[in-house]
C-alpha cells in the first residue's frame, strides 16, 4: 500500500525514546499521526476510561489516558481513516502468551482489531541482570535500530501481502543490536511461548511476585523450544507472532453435551 495512514501509539508515553524511533522510521513509509498516552501507562492491559483530556503535540496528540483509550479516540475521531495501527516501541519485551493480556502495548493492537484495522505491536528486549529492572536501564536510541527497521518493513509490505487476511495483529519483539551480531537481525515467524515461571514469596505482611524466566533470559538459558517468540529473541532474531484478537472460540463437543444435559439437573 502506497503512503498508508498510520496511527502510532504506545504505553511508555508519547515522550519515550522508543516511540520517537518508530515515528521517525514509519514517517518514511507513510503519514504518521501520534495518538499516545501523555504519561507512562505500562502494564495497564486494556484498561479503559470514560473521558480523557487531549493535548496537541508536535507529533500529533497526547492523551491523558490508556493505550486502549488512545486507539479508540484515534480511530473513533482523530484518525478515522487510519490504514494501520502501530503500538510501540516498548522498552522491554512482551514475550509469552501469559504476558499478552497485561501489556498496554499489545492491548493497543488488540483494540484496533475491533475496528477492523490491522495492527502491529512492537517491543524491545532489554537484557538485564537478576537484580535490575529493564525500566531502570538507560536505553540509547540506537538500541531500537532492529525494531525500527523491522517495523518499517512490516508496515511497507504486510497489508499488500495479505498477512492480515489471516492474522488480526502482529506481536513483534526485537533484540538490541549487540545481541544480533554483525549486521541487522533476521526475522523469524513465531508463536507465543507457553512457558510460565511466575511464583510468589511471602515476607510477613508483603508478598513478592517473581517472573523467573527473566533471570534465565539474562543468562541466555531458557526452556523455550524453537519456534517460540522468546527463543527467537534470545537467539538474536526479530520475533513476529501473527495473532488473532482474544477470546476466539472453537466448537467444543464436550461443552455442548454439558449444556444439553443442564435442564435435567434442575431441582
Image (tube, rainbow, N blue to C red):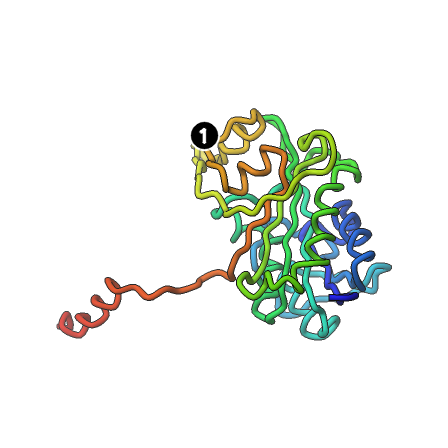
Foreground of the two, 79 or 24? 24
Give percent across and percent down for residue 189: 56, 47
Q: Splitting the image into 4 quarters, where does residue 219 fall? A: top right
Residue furthest out toward the right = 58
Query: Does 259 sit above or below residue 101?
Result: below
Give the labeled residue for mark 1: 203
Give the residue displayed 58% in from the left and 28% down from the top. Answer: 218
Residue at horizontal 83 percent and vertical 64 percent from the top: 56
**Res 140 quadrant in image:** top right
Residue 88 showing in the rendered view: yes
Front residue (pair 169, 112):
169
Pick the front one: 255 or 183? 183
Say left or right for 230 vs 82.
left
- Count of labels in the image: 1
Determine whether 178 is above or below 229 in the image. Answer: above
- Give the position of the N terminus as an image quadrant: bottom right
Q: In this view, does 57 lie to the left or right of 105?
A: right
**Which image quadrant for residue 165?**
bottom right
On the rendered image, what quadrant is the C terminus found in? bottom left
Q: Would you say residue 48 is visible in this rendering? A: no
Amino acid at each position: 500500500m502506497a503512503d498508508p495512514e498510520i496511527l502510532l501509539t504506545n504505553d511508555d508515553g508519547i515522550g519515550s525514546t522508543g516511540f520517537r524511533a518508530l515515528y521517525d522510521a514509519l514517517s518514511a513509509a507513510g503519514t504518521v499521526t501520534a495518538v499516545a498516552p501523555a504519561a507512562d501507562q505500562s502494564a495497564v492491559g486494556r484498561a479503559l476510561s470514560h473521558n480523557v483530556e487531549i493535548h496537541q503535540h508536535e507529533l500529533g496528540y497526547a492523551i491523558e489516558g490508556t493505550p486502549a483509550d488512545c486507539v479508540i479516540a484515534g480511530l473513533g475521531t482523530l484518525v478515522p481513516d487510519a490504514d494501520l495501527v502501530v503500538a510501540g516501541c516498548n522498552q522491554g519485551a512482551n514475550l509469552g502468551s501469559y504476558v499478552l493480556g497485561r501489556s498496554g502495548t499489545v492491548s493497543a493492537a488488540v483494540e484496533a482489531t475491533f475496528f477492523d484495522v490491522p495492527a502491529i505491536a512492537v517491543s524491545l528486549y532489554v537484557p538485564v541482570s537478576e537484580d535490575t529492572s529493564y525500566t531502570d536501564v538507560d536505553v540509547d536510541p540506537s538500541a531500537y535500530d532492529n525494531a525500527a527497521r523491522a517495523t518499517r518493513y512490516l508496515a511497507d509490505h504486510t497489508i499488500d501481502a495479505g498477512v492480515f487476511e489471516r492474522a488480526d495483529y502482529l506481536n513483534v519483539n526485537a533484540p538490541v543490536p549487540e545481541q544480533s551480531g554483525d549486521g541487522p537481525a533476521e526475522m523469524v515467524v513465531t508463536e507465543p511461548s507457553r512457558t510460565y515461571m511466575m511464583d510468589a514469596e511471602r515476607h510477613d505482611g508483603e508478598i513478592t511476585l517473581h517472573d523467573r524466566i527473566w533471570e534465565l533470559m539474562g543468562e541466555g538459558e531458557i526452556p523455550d523450544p524453537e519456534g517460540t517468540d522468546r527463543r527467537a529473541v534470545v537467539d538474536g532474531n526479530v520475533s513476529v507472532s501473527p495473532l488473532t484478537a482474544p477470546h476466539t472460540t472453537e466448537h467444543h463437543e464436550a461443552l455442548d453435551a454439558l449444556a444439553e444435559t443442564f435442564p435435567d439437573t434442575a431441582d
